[in-house]
Image (cartoon, rainbow, N blue to C red):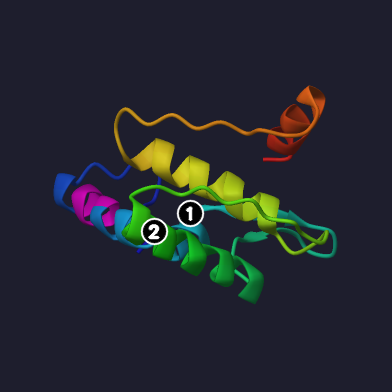
Amino acid sequence: MPVATGVTDPELVYETLKLSRRSHERYCGEFLTIQTKEQGAQPFIWNDAQRLIDRKAAEQMSSTGRIRLIILKSRQLGVSTWVASRLFWKCSLWPDRKGAVVADQADRSGTVMSIY
């Protein structure tokens, strides 16, 4: 249930916020776009690798109360995109949240975030 720009109905905004907080995957598909090589901007629909990472993150959060993932990855699986979307999802829908992108070289974290 995407919210159109300019919607001021407080109940609709509140319901959309609740639904968006409930599911990271749903939030991505409804509110985020990615730039594809073939078709330009498209809704961010998760692939199997992103669902696996999200499932592992959820398991870790429920068992330890935090997420600490080190992902050795192939290119083009959408791992960086999933991470950036999670940071944005958490920081934009919950108050007092901070996120950081860490890379092996300082300029690479800026490169990753400039894509989004």
User: Could you tell me how many numbered marks the image carries?
Assistant: 2
Q: Residue 106 lies in what quarter of the image? A: top right
Q: Residue at x 44, y 29 (%)?
A: 98
Q: Amino acid at mark 2?
A: Pro
Vertical side of 110 occupied by 112: above or below: below
Q: Which residue is mark 2?
A: 2
Q: Residue at x 31, y 54 (%)?
A: 21
| Mark 2: secondary structure | loop
Q: Is residue 18 left or right of residue 68?
A: left
Q: Which residues are magenta?
A: 12-17
Q: Residue at x 48, y 54 (%)?
A: 31
Q: Which residue is mark 1?
A: 31
**Hey, which residue is sitting farthest front in the picture?**
64
- Looking at the image, is mark 1 or mark 2 earlier in the sequence? 2
Picture coordinates of residue 45 (x, y %)? 59, 68
Picture coordinates of residue 78 (x, y %)? 70, 59
Q: Amino acid at mark 1?
A: Phe
Picture coordinates of residue 101 (x, y %)? 62, 34
Vertical side of 97 occupied by 43: above or below: below
Vertical side of 87 occupied by 71: above or below: below
| Mark 1: secondary structure | helix
